[in-house]
Image: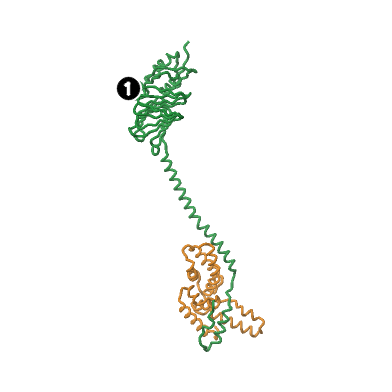
Amino acid sequence: MDSGTFKKIFDRYYDNIRNFLYYKSGDIEVAEDLIQDVFLKLWENRKRIREESVGGYLYTIASNLLKNHYRRNEITFRFINTMVKEEEKETPEYMLEVKEFDERLQAVLAAMPEKSREVFLMHRIDGLTYREIAERLELSVKAIEKRMQKALLFLEQYLDQRI
Amino acid sequence: MKKKSDPMGDGGRGDELLRRAWEHAGHYHVPAQRSREEAWERLQSRIAREERGASHPVLLRRIALYAAAGVILFLALGILFRTVTIEVPPAQKRNLTLPRKVEATLNSGSSLRYHPYLFRSRVYLWGEGFFRVPHGTPFKVITEKGTIEVGGTAFHVSVGKQHLEVACYEGKVLVRSGEEKILLHQGEGVRKTGSGTIERYHLPPGSDRPSWDKGSFSYHDVPLQRVIEEMEKQFGVKIHLPADERHYTGYFTTASLEEALQLVCLPMGYEWEIRGNEVFLRKEE
């Protein structure tokens, strides 16, 4: 893998894996620190890694680094919702309602089991298909579908409750 | 990248809420502290830093390895190309066996250089030497005045500032000096003087080695200066000879200095005085 290929891989995976680290940790500082280590590891091992399998490799490193370096507490998400901004011209009442819903959703997501949460967010935020997620996490598409199902059940169960 | 628009299946109690969450989450962005470009810059500087740190020991080790290999090679070459120099002090002779069983006798004040490992068939001579070379062994004596090539013989070489003299006692000897190539057979000798004239001569019948090897020095029409130099070497003294172009015919032995002076100086009309290690010659009144 030459430095040109390395740059290409960086551009392709940087956002997704940084997000992935955020979905798992809920801490953008940790995510952006660890994403550096992920690519540093890739660079060090660039001679051994084939370009075709690099996606799975990067996600695996990211998971491992997080396990080793990050002690998980209760997490809080601070997702930025473009919908909230887009609809600023709406009535204050509506705005309040959207904001409330947003807060609730973020809290439910933070409480969701990690495996379901990361799959759900990879699909919704990164726009990855189930197949793409399956490839990156080195799982079957069936397993991804199962996790999505669990995520939806979790959302359904808790969204109408205040957490 | 086609998103699954409705994974929720048939409607349920929270159907509407779920649909809204689905949409809402689709508009989420992960907050960022730095852009991807900034992250790339940061990564590049970290890579540069780590490679500098990591590559140094490797580089140093490599340099050390090459240096060690260089030293070993240097020593090995030094041994291979090493030469041994034998210098014979005045008033002494030296017998030695060279590589390939070549026997050499060096006269007083001569020096011989040779390679014990490489180029074993050649020696570098200054002064006088007698060599006995086993039959079939190629051997070369290299001097300032020429090269003597043999293949199993006994011969004598004398080289000085003004002359080269080679005498063949056994077998054949090829002498190369300047453009000249002279082949000597047993009992033949050749003398080349400073002016470049070449004199061939015959050895006394029955001689098997140069007379100096037996402590006797015979001369036939040889510059007096050379005879005096030989005496200096043989007795380890300094002889002060006034300018004299004459030639000498006769002999001396190494039995005693006094006797040698009588044999050489009397016929040439010199008186002498010995003071310690010095001999002063003076024309007789």
Whether residue B267 is visible, yes or no, is yes
Left/right placement of residue B81 relative to residue A125 reads: left
Whether residue B109 is visible, yes or no, is no
Q: Looking at the image, which residue is at 50% across and 77% down?
A: A130
Q: Is residue B70 above or below residue B218?
A: below
Q: Looking at the image, which residue is at 59% across and 78% down?
A: B27
Q: Quadrant location of the C terminus of chain A?
A: bottom right
In the image, the chain rendered in orange is A
Colour scheme of the rendered structure: by chain
Q: Is residue B10 above or below residue B260?
A: below
| Residue that extends furthest to the bottom in the rendered view of this protein | B13
Please state which of residues B144 and B234 is positioned toward the viewer in this rendering.
B144
Sort mark 1 into few (<14), some (14-19) or many (20+) by Cα contacts within 10 Å: few
Please state which of residues B252 and A75 is positioned toward the viewer in this rendering.
B252
Subunit under mark 1: B
How many marks the image carries: the answer is 1
Indicate the quadrant where residue B93 lies.
top left
| Residue B95, horizontal then vertical, whole percent | 36, 29
In the image, the chain rendered in green is B
Amino acid type of the residue that numbered disc 1 sits on in the rendered structure: Gly
Left/right placement of residue B138 relative to residue A16 reads: left
| Residue A157, horizontal then vertical, whole percent | 51, 85
Residue under circle 1? B206
| Residue A19, horizontal then vertical, whole percent | 54, 73
Left/right placement of residue A106 relative to residue B96 reads: right
Badge 1 element: loop
Please state which of residues A120 and A158 is positioned toward the viewer in this rendering.
A120
Q: In this view, does A66 lie above or below B280?
A: below
| Residue A133, horizontal then vertical, whole percent | 50, 75
